[in-house]
Image (cartoon, grey):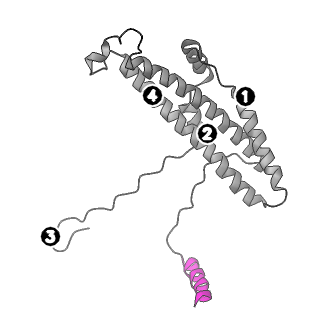
Amino acid sequence: MANKRSGTAAPAKAAKPAKASVTIEIARLLCPAPRVVENIANTFGLSVPDFDGIRESHESAFRKMWHSFDDALNEKATMMHFQRIAGSLVSSAVGAGRFYSEKVSAAKDLTSRLANDHRDEDRDAPVGFDSKAQRAREFAADMAMQAYALLAAAEGAVSAYQEITGEEWKAYQAPTQGPATVERRSAAAEVNAFTA
């Protein structure tokens, strides 16, 4: 659209960036796989989180919550409530998986002599102290265990959600508002009649 005074085009409105969706599939891709967790645990002398135990305890917790409501929630309210709770656990796993991935990249960069711009980092740390690269690798290993444990919790929540609602869990998506139709305008006028 041209500006009448200057004859130049008016700046276009910036589109809102699409919000990254949160799915259990994304969590699975970002968090370390069981084989990777085993390798990390063996290499760094860490304990592997009890994936099945964490998953089962979260499934059980969801069932207990569901039964505690008795008949207080109707079907739609039950779906909405457990969708939100499962969503928070899946979001937590996705966040942990992203953080883990970032820390692995940082550890690799610090360890690689070619990727390191700070040549002093190539030298070993004084005797008795870990180098910055060593600390980065150890931190990434700890984050792997945490991401793996949080993925187990998310898997339990998603599984329980399907059991409770009969539907596969999906992140909440706000409905998009289309242009106002005659029906919507009519409904708005009728609702406004109550506030006069």
Q: In the image, is 11 to the left or to the right of 87?
A: left
Distance (Cα) linking label 1 and label 4: 25 Å
Q: Secondary structure at mark 1?
A: helix
Labels 2, 3: front one: 2
Q: Earlier in the sequence, mark 3 or mark 4?
A: 3
Q: Earlier in the sequence, mark 2 or mark 3?
A: 3
Is residue 159 shown above or below 13? above
Q: Quadrant of the C terminus?
A: bottom right
Identify the residue shown where x is 55% and y is 17%.
40
Q: Secondary structure at mark 2?
A: helix
Labels 1, 3: front one: 1
Q: Earlier in the sequence, mark 4 or mark 2?
A: 2
x, y percent for residue 96: 54, 35
Q: Secondary structure at mark 4?
A: helix
User: Residue 6: which numbered mark, if any?
Assistant: 3
Q: Secondary structure at mark 3?
A: loop
Residue 25, image quadrant: top right
